Image (cartoon, grey):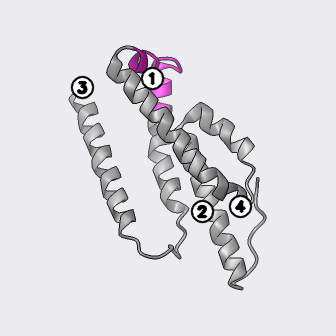
Amino acid sequence: MYTFQMMAFGGLAVAAFVMLLITQTKQRVSWPGWLVPAAAFLPLAVLTLFALVQEGHTAFWPVPTGSLWGMQIWFDRLMGVTAAFFLLQNRARAAGMRSEVWVILVIFTGSLGLLPVLARTVQLEQQQASCRAGHGMPGSASR
């Protein structure tokens, strides 16, 4: 159990560092900002796949339903993902994405699906900004 606790604290430290770093950004990023959510997606996807293979697709259910704290964390996660999708979906639509397709991914995978939505939205926004600035044509966007 000690290993899992260390991983949890490590994840908290990394998330806090990234959030504090983001708050210090004064201007819109000019580098490929979609790489941030894409990079966050990779370790989460690997950990999820590893847990899925090791413990099965329903093994998570006793955790959120086994205690009041588990239920509180479950609802906190649901509300956080819902709020994030609510805030992101208008940006995604404006960038040319069909949110109806992406919401299915988010409903069934939570943050794991939200990260690719964010990455693709930022990528399309940067392509549109680049096109408006006269730096070339954006690539064909998959919707």
Tell me how far mark 4 sits from mark 1, CA to CA.
Answer: 40 Å
Instruction: Say few, some or many: other residues with alpha carbon within 10 Å of mark 4 (under 14 / 14 to 19 / 20 or more).
Output: few
Q: Amino acid at mark 4?
A: Ala
Q: Is residue 27 above or below residue 110?
A: below
Q: Earlier in the sequence, mark 2 or mark 4?
A: 4
User: Magenta includes 58?
Assistant: yes
Label disc, if present, on residue 94 of the rendered structure? 4
Return the x and y of residue 105 as percentages of the image width and height: 64, 38
Of the image marks 1 and 2, the number of the one nearer the N terminus: 1
Q: Which residue is mark 1?
A: 54
Q: Nearer the viewer, mark 4 or mark 1?
A: 4
The span shown in magenta is 49-65
Residue for point 35% across, 51% down = 15
Residue 11 picture quarter: top left
Q: Could you give the CA–CA distance between mark 2 and mark 4, rounded to whole angstroms?
A: 11 Å
Viewed as shown, does residue 120 lie left or right of 61?
A: right
Residue lying farthest bottom? 134
Q: Which residue is mark 2?
A: 122
Give the Cα separation between the discs numbered 2 and 3.
Answer: 37 Å
Query: Badge 2: few (under 14), some or many (20 or more) residues near its Cα, within 10 Å?
Result: many
User: Residue 42 location in percent, x, y?
Assistant: 49, 47
Q: Earlier in the sequence, mark 3 or mark 4?
A: 3
Residue name at image x 34 percent, y 64 percent: 21
Q: Which mark is residue 1?
A: 3
Amino acid marked by disc 1: Gln
Residue found 30% across the figure and 45% down from its top: 12
Q: Is residue 142 magenta?
A: no
> Disc 1 to disc 3, how far (Cα)?
16 Å
